[in-house]
Amino acid sequence: MTDNINDLESTARKLRRDVITMISKAGSGHPGGSLSAADIVTALYFSIMRHDPKNPHWPDRDRFILSKGHAAPILYAALAECGYFPLDWLDTLRKTGTCLQGHTDSTLTPGVDVSAGSLGQGLSVGIGMALAAKLDRKDYRTYVLLGDGECDEGQVWEAAMFAPNYKLDNLIAIVDFNGLQLDGATKDIMNLEPFVTKWRSFNWEVMEINGHDITQIIEALNSARKITAKPVVIVAHTVKGKGVSFMENNVDFHGKAPNKAETELALKELA
Amino acid sequence: MTNYSELSTREAFGKVLTELAAADNRIIVLDADVSRSTMTKYFAQAYPDRFIECGLAEQNMISIAAGLASCGKIPIASTFAVFASSRCFDQVRMCIAQPHSNVKVVATHGGITVGEDGSSHQAIEDISLYCSLPHFNVVVPSDAIETVEVIKTAISTEGPFYIRLGRSKTPVLYPGGCAFKLGQGDKLRDGKDCTIIATGIMVSMAVQAADSLSKSGIQCRVLNMSTLKPIDQKSILDAASDTGAIVTAEEHLLHGGLASMVAQIISCNKPVPLASLGINDTYCKSGKPEELLEMQGLTAGDIVEAVKGVIKRKKGL
Ligand SMILES: Cc1ncc(C[n+]2csc(CCOP(=O)(O)OP(=O)(O)O)c2C)c(N)n1
Ligand SMILES: [Mg+2]
């Protein structure tokens, strides 16, 4: 736990390096969406969330759901760095017998609460957790990270309608708004705009931030705690592939591993 | 106390749930705008804080149930069987089956006896779909009294359940109570000539058929196979060995239901003449439940004919 922005930035850089190394060794995976989420995940796990890596089932822990389950590598990097499991597990990503599956698997990985990979479901699962907290009068919070392309799914909007109806002020959705999905730019594939207006009209408290500015991320997450009687969505403007020049805004690196030369170059840029 | 013998399986579910909820506050009920029909309305009235109205959004409901289960609740998610199976199948797969989530999907209005609403509302694929999912327990109770025991078992047994209930009242098979055991068929009649294996509403017709055959000297064993998954392999193989001929009966597609499972088990271990009554690769139409059952060849009379047929084959005639 730290509020030192420099420390957090260097942690985020370390996690990005882990993502590159891990996906490169696996020979497949999703670097773009892992890198765009790196600063958000860092802020959550190393500053904001109440959690205990030695006690992953602690009932009072804050919950984190990586609804965009293909970004599993960034979550694995954070969990390993926190100490949920040994760092050398990262070398086993996607390999036969591994606890680090291609997409998150709650039955295998300590610290992973939700299996994901089929997009569009995480916000609903988060609602279930937030409802349980209300029923049990517990004060933990539930954070759900969604992709922007993921918001094409109808279920996201079923959940968006539900959460304000039940006044779930212990639920925080964060959208990794990197402007790209699998086939191309979100504005070309399926235009989401006016995105902020949509959430607002569904009765959410909406915040917009630069999703790579850790100070802004932390400020938004802290002010989200003060909102009552409705859920909060943070639309985090990000760059897909952030931190590696040739991956930035490049849809080719949505779901492709870097080759050896690209890996070396990427690690140099992230040093 | 509720007199369960007079109720439809869905009524029995709604009532018993409300009784059980008093002793266990982990029980949470979710419904998707059909609580007046699924009968979760009783629970909603008695425990408004533990009833979660999801509106018309089955996918959201299933994933929410999984979130509740991951926090130690025992969620019962209820809607019509058509929607509980096909509308949210991916959510059931990802959020419940794969992570072994402790969610109980209790679906009402199963099968064609929904009747007048027509094919959009007649779940005929649900058993096949749910049985295809690893980790799921799948149960179709035969009457209101068995329903009560099935619901109790599901709540006290960790893991995913799909329970299919019906719209209409069903004849009472267990007036003196029912000792339901998950994964075990229940022998309601015994005989040496043939075994009728039935599930859900077809069980009472199987009993009728056996009783009428017995008058003409044909003695049938009748198995109530209320648990479709895990299926009671032993009882099925005993039936093959002891009676040498089997008839199955279900209010479901032949493909992927009881017929498929029994065929698979006996053909791999102890092949005997088999005839299967069910819906043969077609959608049904609007109509009175009894008329629809007749159209699909799902009456006690059809079972009688099928039994005579397999006994002939057994004798090599
Ligand atoms: C239901 C579903 N449909 C399709 C896919 C295949 N898929 C994986 S990632 C992706 C694009 C996701 O875009 P976005 O949510 O913007 O993620 P990010 O840009 O953060 O990687 C798609 C279509 C999927 N995983 N799940
Ligand atoms: Mg995106």
Image (cartoon, helix red, strand yellow):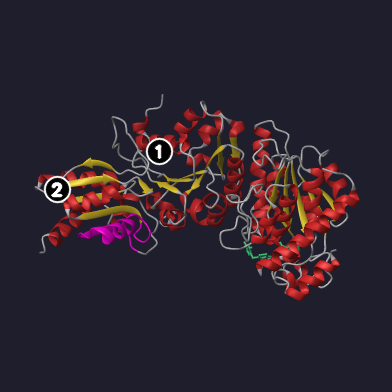
Residue B268: say if magenta: yes
Give the chain letter at badge 1.
B
Report the side of A152 relative to B39 (left or right). Answer: right
From this viewpoint, is residue B313 visible? yes
Q: Which residue is mark 1?
A: B150
Q: Residue B69 in the image: x percent, y percent?
A: 58, 41
SS for callout 1: helix
Dot 1, how many residues are within 10 Å of its Cα: few (below 14), some (14-19), or many (20+)?
A: many
State which tag comes first along the sequence, 1 or 2: 1
> Mark 1 vs ligand 1: CB under 8 Å?
no
Q: Which residue is mark 2?
A: B192
Q: Which segment did they paint magenta?
A: B253-280
Please tell me which residue lies in front, A82 or A71: A82
> Mark 2 vs ligand 1: CB under 8 Å?
no
Amino acid type at circle 2 is: Lys
Q: Residue at x 52, y 26 (%)?
A: B22
Residue A89: say if magenta: no
Give the chain letter at badge 2.
B
Up the image or down, B6 lies above or below B34; here it is above
Q: Quadrant of ligand 1?
A: bottom right
- Mark 1 and mark 2: span between their CA atoms? 29 Å
Residue B262, by quadrant, is: bottom left
Please tell me which residue lies in front, A219 or B295: A219
Report the side of A190 relative to B150 (left or right). Answer: right
Up the image or down, A75 lies above or below B108; here it is below
Q: Residue A159 in the image: x percent, y percent?
A: 67, 49
Q: Residue A124 in the image: x percent, y percent?
A: 65, 48
